[in-house]
Amino acid sequence: MIEISEAEITYYKESLRNECRYDGRNLCDFRPVTFTEDSLLFPNALYGVRVSIPDSKSSLMIAINADIVETKMNDQGVPIDDTFIEIELHTSGSKRQNEANVEQSATMREIKDLIQKFIIKNINTQKLKLYEDKLHWKIACDIYLVGKLYLNDVDYIFKGIRACFSNCRFPKVLVNFNSWTEEYTYEIVSNDEVLFTKDLFPSVYVVGEIEGKVVLDLSKDELQAVDSYYILALNHLGEIIDIEKLDGNPVGINKLGSFVSKLTELSGHLLNM
């Protein structure tokens, strides 16, 4: 976490308490974000998207690719849990182990864990199965960071991943199995199959709380000024499917229940972002 002075934290706290943020936004306003989506953004990928993070020199490039692999089976020939989607984060920073790079590596690990928990575990992978569940698509999602990433930027990673998956077109493949050679052959009949629609993806946000008020789209400085912050996941109906407090500060159950109620009231607003 970037360090700011106590005076600066006090300034941001007062700004949020008075519901007048330093950039003129209301507490639940989002900053405009620029997405560049193009199937040729990454020539060797199925699809790619570039995300410019507001009020930052940093940006993200997200690419999706896929291979067909055999599904792991147990001794009884029953499919077992397998990795259908893998996420990797890459940074362009120096490999030297100075303090800033160590901190950034820790942030990247935390963000990867959040992607795994709030997105990957909530994706229905049934459409990735092929040929009697014996084969499946294995999706590789690579996220390239240009610049430095902070925890509040997770909002834009989540939005970029969602945009990338829901706009990607996969090959439609006919699979044949030769029982003599025990080999599979594939025939691509089109390149426009949609495996992921937006209703299959959770909407995930970093949400701040100060004196019971909800704060959305936090800046990196506001992240240090709020009383608490959470990761919130909603399904396509606006129902809360996961929420986790991240800053380590204790919170009473009554206060949390009241805060969740406010988030539920805001779910329609969040889904439109």
Image: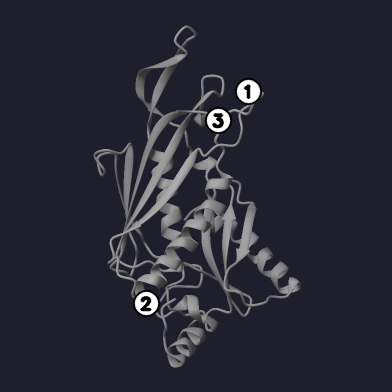
Q: Kindly report the distance in space between the C-alpha atoms of the residues bearing marks 2 and 3.
A: 41 Å
| Camera-side residue of 60 and 68 | 68
User: Is residue 241 placed above or below 22 in the rendered structure?
Assistant: above
| Camera-side residue of 107 and 240 | 107
Taking the view exactly as shown, the residue that stands out farthest to the bottom is 7
Q: Earlier in the sequence, mark 2 or mark 1?
A: 1
Q: Earlier in the sequence, mark 1 or mark 3?
A: 3
**Residue 154, numbered circle:** none
Residue at 75 percent of width and 72 percent of height: 254
Viewer can see residue 30: no
Q: How far from the left and from the top, in percent, is residue 11? A: 45, 88
Q: Is residue 165 found left or right of 204 in the rendered image?
A: left
Quarter of the figure with residue 75: top right
Label 2: which residue?
A: 99
| Camera-side residue of 192 and 108 | 108
**Residue 72, numbered circle:** 3
Q: How far from the left and from the top, in percent, is residue 185? A: 40, 15
**Mark 2 vs 1: CB contact within 8 A:** no
Taking the view exactly as shown, the residue that stands out farthest to the right is 254
Q: How far from the left and from the top, in percent, is residue 186? A: 39, 17
**Residue 77, numbered circle:** 1
Q: Kindly report the distance in space between the C-alpha atoms of the residues bearing marks 1 and 3.
A: 9 Å
SS for tag 1? loop
Q: Amino acid at mark 2?
A: Glu
User: Is residue 269 placed above or below 225 in the rendered structure?
Assistant: above
